[in-house]
Amino acid sequence: MLTRRFILALGCATMLAGATPASADDKLKVVASFSVLGDVVREVGGSHVDVSTLIGPNGDPHEYEPAPDDAKRLRDAQVVFVSGLGLEGFMDRLVKASGFKGEPVVASANIKPLDLEEEAGHDHNHEGHDHGHEHDVDPHVWNDPKNVESWVGVIEQALAKADPSQAESFKTNAARYTAELQKLDAFAKAEIGKTPKENRRILTSHDAFGYFGAAYGVTFLSPVGLSTESEASARDVAKLIDQIKAEKIRTYFFENSNDPRLVRQIAQATGAEPGGELYVESLSGPDGPASTYAKMFRHNVELVAGALSRTN
């Protein structure tokens, strides 16, 4: 929550959004809410955008607390991107406090979200939790590259509107990156398709792989809900342990952006073996295995497919 001291510290600075750069050589100043979205914006914008992200590598969007520097970046931005669907709960307050006069561009605006109760191939063992997301929809859309294709279309249009002089460049970049996303989707289908669908079951830290599961027929079980701010009850954990034992789930994963202790305790109680670290809500640092969205998705597919192949 933004404090009164924080808001007063921002002063009365204001910035009109959507301004066109003074010349074709100037870069658009763009802010993206988190590292995954920021990388996709860079792919579309190329050399014509200067992108910064509020939540950097290994950050957790669910628990993020804005800093005064974030407000300054918003104030100076010409375009601001968010994923939407309730992921960035802090954003409305930050925009108001910063003096940014535009409307953030919602990258997920054209994506039909998965409802928590209707996610295909996904089990939920966290009854009664407050997930912190409106209407209990899953905000983790980027874990299916087809949804990132939708992001690309929204991003291209927003950048072209802000800088019409570079519209053709944005269009070319968007087409190139869309082709790369389609290759990632084909790669995932081929790798995960090697395991029979009835055997594709994985234990993870929290509910963030619903779109991945729906796209590739993998069931992800987790002790907590869509938000890492939710907590699993003792009853939920006991039910999950019983289910893992009954279904003989042999592999668990932890995630780079949240606490792995609970999932490790569950794994110890069930005999599940560690499968490695998945990158679900943020990229790794530049020297890590998931420094771009493409690398992140490929890394996750390789770990999940490898674990499934070892247990069948």
Image: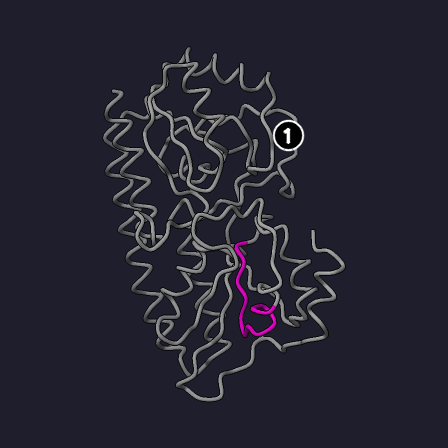
**Residue 97: x, y in percent?**
69, 64
With 298 as the anchor, is 263 left or right in this view? Answer: right
* Location of residue 249 by image quarter: top left
Residue 86 to residue 30: above or below: above
Nearest the viewer among 254 and 68 is 68
Residue kind at label 1, given as amino acid type? His
Residue at position x 70%, y 67% in the image: 9
Residue 224 to residue 243: above or below: below
Quarter containing the C terminus: top left
Residue at position x 25%, y 31% in the image: 306
Residue 200 to residue 136: above or below: above
**Residue 242: x, y in percent?**
48, 12
**Residue 76 on the magenta segment:** yes
- Residue at mark 1: 129
Number of residues whose C-alpha sits closer than 10 Å to that of mark 1, classed few (under 14), some (14–19) or many (20 or more): some
Nearest the viewer among 68 and 120 is 68
Residue at the right extreme of this rendering: 4
With 291 as the anchor, is 20 left or right in this view? Answer: right
Magenta-colored span = 72-83
- Number of numbered callouts drawn: 1
* Location of residue 219 by image quarter: top left
**Residue 97 on the magenta segment:** no
| Colour convention | one colour
Q: Secondary structure at mark 1?
A: loop
Residue at position x 47%, y 28% in the image: 261
**Residue 71: x, y in percent?**
61, 65
**Residue 193: x, y in percent?**
26, 33
Residue 204 to residue 149: above or below: above
Residue at position x 30%, y 39% in the image: 301
